[in-house]
Amino acid sequence: MSQSSPVPRPRVVIVGGGFGGLAAARELANAPVDVTVLDRRNYHLFQPLLYQVATAALSPSEIAWPIRHLLRRQANARVLLAEATGVDLDAGSVRTTAGDQPYDYLVVATGAAHSYFGHPEWADWAPGLKSIEDATAIRRRVLGAFERAENAAAAEREGLLTFVIVGGGPTGVEMAGAVAELARDALARDFRNVDPRDAKVVLIEAGERILAAFPESLAAYATRMLERLGVTVMTRTAVTGCDAQGVDLGDERLASSTVIWAAGVAASPLAADLAGPHDRAGRSVVEEDLSLQGHPNVFVVGDAASMTGPAGVPVPGIAPAAKQAGRHAALVIEAQVAGRPTPGAFRYRHAGDLATIGRSAAVVRFDGFRLTGWLGWVFWGLAHIYFLIGLRNRVAVALDWSWSWLTRQRHVRLIIG
């Protein structure tokens, strides 16, 4: 009697090893499927602390972990180091630099890129902050500006010691505070010809105020604390030009050799090329269960998707939202594979908003209460340490922060590249 061959298990391909992709992979750990996590980098990155790498407070290894290590105990998962270049929805295959990867279910979690509002050429002069490469490049620019100013003529120093951050969201606010503290504390006594405390940090926001997603009282507190650090906060101001010598603000010219972009996001090229409707940022407008319109076996999560919550409120592009979306997509896949009713519409649960301004100052809105000052800063720190992966990284970051707080020093002041 002939023996029947085993029925192949459904293949789930997850493109992207960020918050959404990793959450989806882990949720599928006990499902009767074969999971492939595909990413062009071999590590998962804790992006909320990336600005601390850029300002010499943390090492890249403290906020990144190999994806293979994170999934080593998940028997149904494999990791593929490759870049996805396209999706053939009709054939059910992802085109990659390592060959085509067929799928029965697909989760696109490719995150977002920077948006320069129709001026991609600005990227050469105003790098954004999405990867470790971005962070180390910004660190090189910031530290290099002080080194160049030490040996520059007096007329050139003002532009070298002017740092412009474009975008008043949490990333821009945190970056502005960190650069100001780096100049006035960590570098204050290290130079002979220039005084780093003379550095000028300018935060530019096109909207009415910084931290638009926060309550107005918390945004006002953040503005006061930034100004106390010496940061110039400019609201209702749009950047109209950018080059190697600085930025244009309408008719005004602001000379700066270091411009950092923290304004606006755009969908990754893979998500922008998917079939179906997209929003103005190029993100896929998904169905209620996060599936791609017309393709119930394809899901788009995190910053690659335009998601809405109850009453049509847009889901913010933050790590908790990506995690929740990744888990929801995985639950829908599990239900479809098992022939059970699916969980239905995705419902985002917003826990709160956090942003640190600098030493012993932060703003927190969490589960109905608000914190500022030292208490807010402690809460912000504990929350970030809790969500880091691995005991070693939690301990290392906690020790680094404690040392920096006690000594006002930054230990990762390396100019690389």
Image: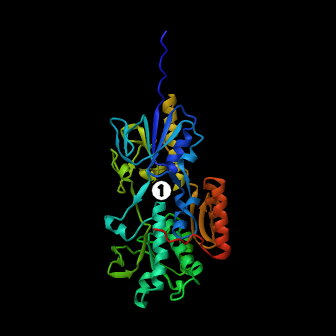
Q: Measured from the top left, where is residue 162 in percent x and y? A: 45, 81
The local secondary structure at tag 1 comes to loop
From this view, report whether residue 203 is shown above or below residue 365. below
Q: Position of residue 152 (x, y in %)?
A: 43, 86
Q: Which residue is mark 1?
A: 317
Left or right of 295 on screen, residue 402:
right
Looking at the picture, how far across and down is residue 340, in whole percent? 52, 30
Q: Is residue 172 above or below residue 160?
A: above
Of the pair 141 and 402, the residue shown nearer to us: 141
Q: Is residue 127 left or right of residue 50?
A: left
Left or right: residue 350 compared with residue 288? right
**In this view, which residue lies farthest toward the bottom?**
154
Residue drawn 46% across and 62% down?
133
Task: Tell me what residue is drawn at x 36 percent, y 79 percent.
Answer: 245
Number of callouts in the render? 1
| Vertical placement of residue 67 versus 161, above or below | above
Q: Residue at x 66, y 63 (%)?
A: 398
Foreground of the two, 42 or 23: 42
Q: Residue furthest top?
A: 1
Q: Position of residue 230 (x, y in %)?
A: 53, 81
Question: Does the rendering let one see residue 77?
Answer: yes
